[in-house]
Image (cartoon, rainbow, N blue to C red):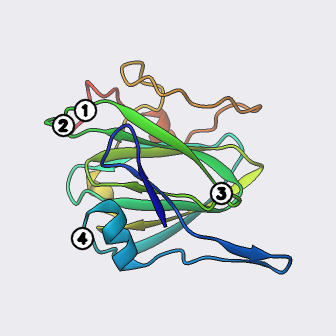
Amino acid sequence: MQATRLAIPDVVLLEPKVFGDARGFFFESFNQQAFNDATGTHYQFVQDNHSRSSRGVLRGLHYQIQQPQGKLVRVVRGAVFDVAVDIRKSSPTFGQWVGAELSEDNHRQLWVPPGFAHGFIVLSETADFLYKTTDYYAPQHERCIAWDDAAIGIDWPHVDVPVQLSAKDRAGKSLAEADL
């Protein structure tokens, strides 16, 4: 597995070794020891989630103020642009973001540690998005930062349809107003 630390070094892009031929492909999608070595962490995952969304759906920027979740995310159908925003007040990269395209073709995974808000926009007709979390979903602790907060300045890629948001995501707060 190749591990690349992004501009915010705690966020790691993971690229597995893919073995393929005319019949298809094989790769190891998760190995605890390889993950620990690649990220320099020792998190255990407690929950797996799967979402399907259509082109232009934007989910996020989500986080939990208690029971913060680290997320190991990947796409098994389609393509998304995935984003992590550092919301750790004491961090030198507080309020900064990093992003990467994840797709069924590139097999990339993104490690988003606890202390980050997370979101993605679907670039393909549909996308199946899988993620492992280090803590359980706690709706009473979930919060949302506005996807278009100018103070963060995420450079979302253009999609040829209007951005689609849930009511929860439309109500996202600016980073300055957010519960952190």
SS of the residue at dot 2?
Answer: loop
SS of the residue at dot 3?
Answer: loop
Q: How many marks?
A: 4
Where residue 64 appears, as percent x and y from the top left, is 28, 52
Q: Disc 2 designates what residue?
A: 91
x 68%, y 39%: residue: 56
x 27%, y 54%: residue: 114
Cα distance in 3D space between marks 1 and 2: 5 Å
Query: How packed is label 4: few (under 14 Cα within 10 Å), some, or many (20 or more)?
Result: few
Q: Which mark, by number, is residue 9?
A: none
Q: Mark 4 touching mark 3, by CB under 8 A?
A: no
Earlier residue among tags 3 and 1? 1
SS of the residue at dot 4?
Answer: loop
Cα distance in 3D space between marks 4 and 3: 26 Å
Earlier residue among tags 4 and 2? 4
User: Where is the C terminus found, in terms of image quarters?
Assistant: top left
x 32%, y 44%: residue: 9
Between 116 and 40, the one nearer to me in the picture: 40
Earlier residue among tags 4 and 3? 4
Cα distance in 3D space between marks 4 and 1: 23 Å
Which corner quadrant of the image does residue 84 belong to?
A: top left
Cα distance in 3D space between marks 2 and 3: 30 Å
Query: How packed is label 1: few (under 14 Cα within 10 Å), some, or many (20 or more)?
Result: some
Q: Residue furthest top?
A: 150
Q: Disc 1 designates what residue?
A: 94
Q: Is residue 34 above or below residue 162?
A: below
Where residue 97 appears, as percent x and y from the top left, is 39, 34
Amino acid type at circle 2 is: Ser
Q: Mark 1 touching mark 2, by CB under 8 A?
A: yes
Q: Disc 4 designates what residue?
A: 42
Between 170 and 87, the one nearer to me in the picture: 87
Where residue 11 appears, as percent x and y from the top left, is 36, 49
